[in-house]
Amino acid sequence: MAAPSTPTGPGDASNRSLKQLVLGRRDVQDLSDTEQELPSELMTINMGPSHPAMHGTVRIVLTVDGERIVASDVQPGYLHRCFEKESEYATYTQVFPYTDRLNYVSPMINNCGWAMVAEKLMGLTGKLPRRAEYIRVIVSEMSRMTDHLTCVGASAMELGAFTPFLYLLKCREWLYELLEKVSGARLTHSYVRIGGVGKDLTPNFDAELTLCLDQIVKVMVECESMLNHNKIFRDRMAGVGAMSKDDAIATGCVGPIARAAGVDYDVRKDYPYSVYPELEFDVPVGTTGDCYDRYLVRIEELKQCIRILRQCLKQIPDGPVMVDDPRVALPAKAATYNTIESMIRHFKHIMDGIKVPAGEAYAFVEGGNGELGFYVVADGTGRPYKAYVRSPSFVHLSTASQLIHGHLIADVVPIFGMINMIGGECDK
Amino acid sequence: MSAKVLDALKAAHGAAIDSVETQHGDAIAWVVRDRLLAVATWLKSDPAMAFDAPVFATCIDRLDWKPIDVPPGPPVYPASAGWTEDRPRFEVVYQLRSTRHRHRLRLKCAVPEHDARVPSLSSLWPAFNWQERETFDMYGISFDGHPDQRRIYLYDEFVGYPLRKDYPKEKRQPLVRRDDLPINPIKVPGGHR
Amino acid sequence: MGLELTTTRLEDAAKWAKQSTLDRASNWGRKFSLFTYPFVTACCGMEFMSVAGPKYDIARFGAEFPRFSPRQSDLLMIVGTITEKQGPALKRVFDQMTEPKWVIAFGVCASTGGFYQNYHAMPGADQVIPVDVYIPGCPPRPEQVLDALIMLMDRIQSGRGHSQLRTKRDQLIAEAGPGEG
């Protein structure tokens, strides 16, 4: 804007107010009639692909009328890392690291989903040892907690509430430490294997996890007290980005977004897998589908995750963690080092991969964002012929354009934050 | 549950359905390409079917399909395993779900390479809008009636369809490089936006 | 003059990029007040959040405030995989940053492409812009990031960041005048 110059409008110097004299600005009532018409062209603004909101990279080209969004074009693909093409060249076990990087805030769930689809193709569903199933549920729920903690924390930070972000990150660190003890990596675990999990839990795991959960409950109370009835938070989130139940179903929304809109769909309850039928938990369902409902659904799901984890720690049996099937399990180390047959079998497993019989299957789990599915076409070799990821973030991002329509530019931030679009999952 | 869906589908649209099968508990129906929109509309609107939730839409490229170790005994994988050279190259796959009846269905549509077009289902289920764009981007299948068919993951200057089996995995088409690197980026007049 | 200005190695840079006391003092100030531009794309962003979080506090090194405008920041942290589609955006952001500026490639995807060798993931962010410090790891542990930050600070102090050397070189060429060097 040009530097304020001495006003030359109607009215002589004696009429000018102090503000005009000092600032050189003219008030609206001093403008002549022709000058009072505001310009009315639409402006095109670009948001992204380097997004300050730390949600990965998405570019939104907004057409705005003043501050109100009239049209938008959401352009994903800035993190397209070719999961499908890479998995056609990797063995089934080598795909696990690629799956970690899909929804990188809840990596164990992606691992479990991939293991489930390979097991479905091989006919091993339901034949895993119970301990392996319980471990999978434990680490999946811990991953779901890290997902929701990150989502809520980052969204709060983008609205200016920096303290809940730091508190929730503190909780996330505790979970990362435990997951690192179990799998070896803080973030990209690659812990699950086809037929079970990689290795057993650490000896003192349940005591450590119980302590961690008790502390997380206390921090959650603090964060809820800071956010739930905070006027600024509610004003920015309530009524923003509302979605009706029918829209949610027709646009393929699943997970916390659909549940906030009133769709009672949770894969763990509707198509139960693993040991979820034996666990008691509730599924929170919202009413209006706006951002505040999505926030509340996520907070409640965190509490339900804690409930599930406590039950799992009580119910987990002892036993092996890998199914005793020579098609998928690596031989025991003692046998590998001492007998030639086991060594050859180990070699073939690693080099050729697990031979999955020809066919196709679609297996899905309840990811942090909803129904995360893997559609695999197998051709009998150790490498998948096609591996498609049904990523919930991609579907949710396609609704973003319709959600932000009519809102202000500043409303894009909470809407985008509560969609929880994870770039790795969206762009595969 | 899936058998009932398939039976009802065959009863209502016998001519449009090539074949049906069940693999690992999933119901799959092969639909003739020209009747795909009619079948899908019926699946959405019929109260006994009520497939209101779209799950995914993708494509399979059968160029390198040479399955091995197909297990002997009763044929478990009838249609996919018996692929021959003269069958169409692409299969467009749609998966649907019903919130009311809790059943799922997979629709498949064989598409030849020389005429890679399929009617778009994005008017029935908005979720397929982006997923069909993704299938177009990756495989080059064109969807008739799609409101906004353009690339979604890759940039417009990209030539080729990468998930096809004949596209080499590491063939890069860089948009920009440092001035001293020998790899030639795509030069667009006016620079890149 | 035959200025051999191709490396940032300490021995070579010491020959021609001598630091005056003013240089040393201003570099001291620069290294302890880095304003980062976290160009976050992928999973490494989670570890960046952990580094900025209370446990592995990056604020104690002075690099606390992320400035999401290239005009206001001096350290571009490329966090996560850079794809070909993202290349022009990255180049633009880097070009818009004002001198002196430094670049850290955070994570192995930004350093060399990681385990992604395909038609879209760029084999390292240094295909597009010059990088000062590379952090390996997928994702790197926060301690590794802090170690890299300390390494970068040493570079800044000795004036051997790429942009500092470029500035010095241009200054020397300008002083040498036309028709020489």
Image (cartoon, coloured by chain):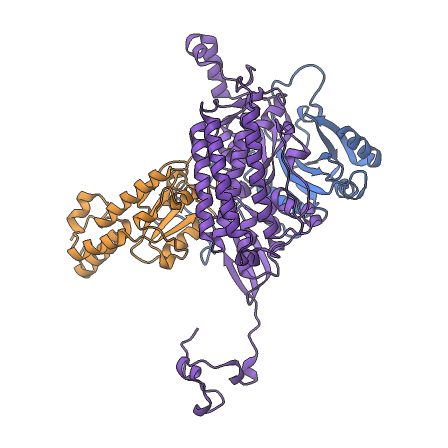
Residue A367 x, y percent position in the rendering: 58, 37
Q: Colour of chain B?
A: blue
Which colour is chain C painted? Answer: orange
* Chain seen in purple: A
Residue in the image at 41% along x and 11% along y: A337
Picture residue at 79% right of the left edge, 42% below the top: B42
Instruction: Name the residue rendered at 50%, 30% in the picture.
Output: A96
Q: Position of residue C88 (x, y in %)?
A: 44, 52
Q: Quadrant of the C terminus of chain C?
A: bottom left
Please give the name of the residue rendered at 55% of the width and 51% of the height, measured from the top-left corner.
Answer: A228
Residue A277 locus on image (x, y percent): 65, 28
Residue A291 x, y percent position in the rendering? 59, 52
Viewer-closest of A391 and A262: A262
Residue A317 as seen in the image, left or right of residue B101: left
Nearest to the observer: residue C23 or residue A236: A236
Q: Nearer the viewer, residue A138 or B117?
A: A138
| Residue B186 makes an appearance in the image | no
